[in-house]
Image (cartoon, rainbow, N blue to C red):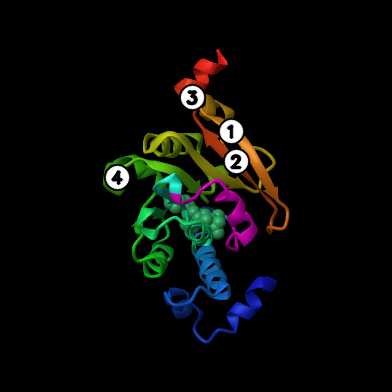
Amino acid sequence: MPKFLTQAWNCKDPRSKALDPSTSSSAAEAVSFFQAWLRNPLRIAAIAPSGSALAGLITAEISAETGPVIELGPGTGSFTRALISRGVLQSELALIEFEPRLATSLRLRYPRATVLQMDASRLSSIKLFDQRPAGAVVSGLPLLSMAPRQTTKILAASFSKMQPGGAFYQFTYGFRCPVPTKVLNRLNLKAERIGWVFSNLPPAAVYRLSRPTTDSALGAS
Ligand SMILES: C[S@@+](CC[C@H](N)C(=O)[O-])C[C@H]1O[C@@H](n2cnc3c(N)ncnc32)[C@H](O)[C@@H]1O
């Protein structure tokens, strides 16, 4: 059994502890996450939640001033917790999680956030934040295992829900941006790696995807 789970398995009832909103035990979260992986390894795509260093990097450019934030694939909430600690109000968060039990757990833990149990590919079909545009999207989605068409749908919907200048933050365990260049070009997006977290298991990189604003496009010409 992976070492990070041994302590967690000592809990008397790990599942009920994971669903208890009063606890943010990382051991309980690890168990909940691992159980989700056992149910659907391809969709979860990692056996443990992201660590705090990765959560810190992927949320580093976000603050209370950013405006509403959409989080795709929050899992057990590693990035959600980091967003809240940066000053983002729960009521300014929309958490889009496909796995029903993880969504239920997020609802209990973040009762003032909008938690939607759904496929992020359907993002274009929903209204969020009373139609106010988001300032950022933070994604834990396993884009590398998604078809380019699905990635395109998710990115197009994300940018349609963001104000100009908004950014989409994505992490990856790979050495390159997980969004194919042809998808970036089709959507007029640029991708910049903002850093690596070597202490994460496995090591991960974070990319910022953004769309040149009219002003910067004019300035560049
Ligand atoms: C690699 S885990 C990341 C979880 C968390 N953000 C973290 O870093 O610890 C991927 C998460 O995305 C969710 N997910 C995968 N495909 C999804 C989809 N199409 N729509 C919504 N959520 C999805 C999974 O259920 C899982 O919670």
Q: CA distance from mark 2 to mark 3?
A: 18 Å
Q: Residues within 10 Å of mark 4 (few under 14, many from 20)?
A: few
Query: Residue at the location (36% across, 43% down)?
Result: 123
Q: Which residue is mark 1?
A: 191
Q: CA distance from mark 4 to mark 3?
A: 23 Å
Considering only order in the chain, which callout, 2 or 4, is on the residue closer to the N terminus? 4
Q: Is mark 3 within 8 Å of ligand 1?
A: no
Which numbered tag is attached to residue 186? 3
* Circle 1 or circle 4, nearest the eye: 1
Considering only order in the chain, which callout, 3 or 4, is on the residue closer to the N terminus? 4
Callout 3 amino acid = Arg
* Circle 2 or circle 3, nearest the eye: 2
Considering only order in the chain, which callout, 4 or 1, is on the residue closer to the N terminus? 4
Residues marked 2 and 1 touching at CB (< 8 Å): yes
Callout 4 amino acid = Ile
Q: Is residue 58 magenta?
A: yes
Residue 57 in the image: above or below residue 183? below
Query: Residue at the location (40% across, 58% down)?
Result: 89
Q: Which residue is mark 4?
A: 126
Residue 150 in the image: above or below residue 139? above
Residue 187 in the image: above or below residue 193? above
Instruction: Label 2: state its secondary structure.
Output: strand
Q: Which residue is mark 2?
A: 207
Instruction: Label 4: state its secondary structure.
Output: loop
Quarter of the picture containing the N terminus is bottom right
Callout 2 amino acid = Tyr
Q: CA distance from mark 1 to mark 4?
A: 26 Å
Instruction: Label 3: state its secondary structure.
Output: helix
Callout 1 amino acid = Ala
